[in-house]
Image: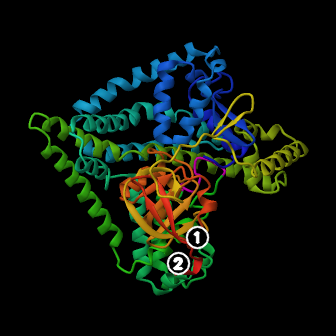
Amino acid sequence: MLDPMKPCGYSVFQHLIPFGRCEETGKTPYIKYAGSFVYLDITDMMLIPPYRKMWLFTAGNMMEELKLSVEYVVKREEFTKQKGNMLGVLKAILMVWIIVLPRLIWNLIFCLRPEDTSEHYLNFIEDRILKAKSKIMSCDDKYKRVVIAKNALSTLLFEILLNWAPKLMSGIISFGLMRKLIEPSPTSEQDLNALMRGLPGNVTTEMDLEIGDLADVARTEPQVSAWLQNGKDLTLHGLSLLPKTDSLRFRDALSHFLDKYGSRGNAEIDISRPRWRDNPAAILHAISGNLTNTDAGHHREHHQRLVKEGEEAGKRLVALAPWYKRPILRRLVRNGRGYGAIREHHKFLMIRLMGELRKAILNVAQSHVDSKHLNSVEDIWMLHLDEIVALPSMTEDELQALVCDRKEHFQMHSKLKPPRVLTSEGECVNVMPNSKDIPDGALGGLGTSSGIVEGVVNVILDPHSTVLHSGEILVTRCTDPGWTPLFINAAGLVMEVGGYLTHGSVVSREYGIPAVSCIADATSVLKTGMRVRVDGTRGYVEILQEGSTDERN
C-alpha cells in the first residue's frame, strides 16, 4: 500500500503478523511506522543468503522496482557484515515449512478434486466469520468486543498457513512444472497465459459478475438506469431520492450485494478506510460504466468465453505433449486452475474479519462522540488498538490532545511520496527497471499481461469518484481488490507500481487484457482523453494522440 496509514491501521498490522511477537503486547517488531507509512523490516531475513535469494525472486515477481531497490542495498559490504536475529528467523522459516510442506505435497499429488478447492474454502470462510461474529456479539462490553475481534484477526495468518498457503503454492508450483515439461514455443506460451483465464470460483471474479448482474437489474428500471448514466450523486443518498416503486429491484439487489461484499473497499487493508457498506460509490460508478454496453448479460457471456479459453488451452497443452508426460500435465493443469482460483480467498477472509473489528471500534467511537470526548467517529483511527481498549482510563483532555497531535502529523505526512525501500539510516532507495527494445518516445515499463490494445486513457486515482467507460485504458498508481470492479470495463491497464504477481497484473491476465506496470509517473505523464497503445507483451505505452476529455464521449 502506497498511501499513508493512520495509527489504528498500523496497530492492526502489528497484531496481524504472527512472527516475533512480544508476549506482553502481542505485537511484532517487523512492522515499522515511518512518516505515517507502514514498512516491513526485512533486515534479519536478508542476512540469510538462501532466503535472500528466494525473497528477491519473489519480490521480482511482485514488484520489480522493489526487488531492484532491495538488491541495491543488500549487496553493500556494510549490510552483509551486520549480525541480525538469524537464529530467530531460521526457526520461524523452519516452523512454516514443517506446517506447510506435508500439506503442499498432499495437495500437489494426492488431492482427488482440486476443482472443488474454491467451494471448500468459501465454506471455511463463512464458518470462520460466523464463529467470530457469534463470539463478538456474545460480549456486552464494547471494549472487550474490540479485544475479541482483534484476537480473531491475530490468529488469521496461522490459519492461512494451514489452510490456504499449501493449496495456492501447489498451484504456483504446478505452473512452474508445466513450463519445464512443455516444449517452449509461441503457441505453448500463449496457452500457458490463457490457462489462467476464467478460473472457476475465483471470489473476485464472482464479485465482478455480480456487479454486472446489478447493471442488468438497473437496465430493467429506466429511472435507475438514467440516474446511473447521468453520473451525478452516485451515492446511497442519490439512490434514496428515486421513487421506491421505480427502483425497488435495484435497491434489493444492491442491498444483497453489500451484505456479501460490503466489507471491501479501496485500500481495504487499512481498517480506517471507508467500506462499500459505508459508501458504495465505487460500485455505482462501475455499474454506470457497464451500462455503456447495451447488451444485458454480456459480462457473463464474456466470462464463459474466458472459461472456455482456459479449459481449451489446458487440453491443448496436454495434447501437444508426448504420451508419457500427458498424465502428469493433466494433473498439473487441474492443480493450476483449481488452486489458482483461491488466490484472493485469504484476503477476502481477512477483510471480512477486519470488518468485524471495524464495527466494534466504530461502536466505541460513537459512544465517545455521544459523550463529547471525540469530535468525530473518524478521530478513533488516530489511536492504537491498545489505546482504544484503554479509553475509559483516559481523560477528555488527554484524548483530545493525542488525537489533535496525531492528526496534525498525519496531514503533514500525507503530502509525502514514500520510497519503495527505506534504510535504518533514513536513506530513500528507488531503483527503476530499464526498458529495452521499445519505440522511440514510448514509455517503457514491465509487461505483465500480454497483448496489444489501443484506446482512450482514463486516469483514476480514486475508484469512488470516477466512471471508467467500457473500452477505456485504466491508468493508475496501483490496484487492490477494491479496484477490481473497474476491470469489467477496462480494455487495458497501466500502473506506476507492480510486478507479475501484483493484483492488477494477475487480474488483467485472468480477464485477458494487456497490462504494463512500472511506468514512472504514469498518472502525471498520461492524461485522461489521450489515445494510447498499450503493449503488454513488450512492456511499453505509446502515446498516439494527445486528445482531450471530450474525445471519451
Q: Quadrant of residue 331?
A: top left
- Type of amino acid at the residue the image marks with label 1: Thr
Q: Quadrant of residue 529?
A: bottom right
Mark 2, residue position: 552
* 239 horizontally vs 446: left or right: right
Mark 1 and mark 2 in contact? Answer it, CB < 8 Å. yes
What residue is drawn where x is 28% and y is 46%?
337
332 w.r.t. 309: above or below: above
Q: Position of residue 162 (x, y in %)?
A: 41, 30
Which region shows up in magenta?
263-272
**Whole-number angstrom distance, CA of label 1 to CA of label 2:** 8 Å
User: Does the magenta portion include 265?
Assistant: yes
Could one spot residue 489 in this view of the protein? Answer: no
Foreground of the two, 26 or 14: 14
* 88 horizontally vs 510: left or right: right
Farthest-out residue, front: 440
* 275 horizontally vs 309: left or right: right
**Numbered circle sitting on residue 528:** 1
Q: Quadrant of residue 265?
A: bottom right
Foreground of the two, 410 or 519: 519
Q: Earlier in the sequence, mark 1 or mark 2?
A: 1
Q: Position of residue 460 (x, y in %)?
A: 58, 64
What residue is drawn where x is 60% and y is 40%?
431
* 425 horizontally vs 188: left or right: right
Could one spot residue 517 in this view of the protein? Answer: yes
